[in-house]
Image: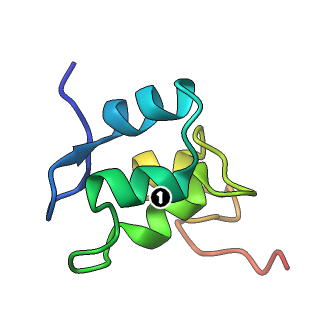
Amino acid sequence: MAEITICYCFNVTKADIEKRLAEGKSLDEIRADTGLGWGCGGCARMAEKLWGENGDPNDPSFYFNAVETDNSGTGVESDAD
């Protein structure tokens, strides 16, 4: 299985982040060690969404770029708020 690159500026992978988290490092420590989020900043929001304080590393919207739909198969976004 191919590695998923999270930060292209500093070549930080999902596996690298999750390994460091398993070693007990915080997301802030990982940022400081790897540069995650310090280049163009494009990965910062994604990293927070997946591994931040209220993050969910299994969030399918990250992996599939999914939008919430009305489940009718039309692809129309729902008004669920």
**Closest to the observer, 79 or 30:** 30
**What residue appears at the point 16 percent right and 58 percent down from the top-left corner?**
10
**What residue appears at the point 22 percent right and 18 percent down from the top-left corner?**
1
Element class at badge 1: helix
Mark 1, residue position: 47
Give residue 2's position: percent from left, percent from top: 18, 26
Give residue 11's position: percent from left, percent from top: 15, 50
Q: Which quadrant of the view contains residue 7?
A: bottom left
Q: Which quadrant of the view contains residue 16?
A: top left
Task: Classify 12 as above or below 81.
Answer: above
Q: Amino acid at mark 1?
A: Ala
In the rendered image, the residue lying farthest to the top is 1
Task: Classify 26 as above or below 14.
Answer: below
Give residue 3's position: percent from left, percent from top: 22, 31
Give residue 45's position: percent from left, percent from top: 48, 71
**What residue appears at the point 42 percent right and 49 percent down from the top-left corner?**
64
**Closest to the observer, 17 or 28:** 28
64 horizontally vs 38: left or right = right
Say few, some or many: other residues with alpha carbon within 10 Å of mark 1 (under 14 / 14 to 19 / 20 or more). many
**Closest to the observer, 16 or 33:** 33
Q: Which quadrant of the view contains residue 8?
A: bottom left
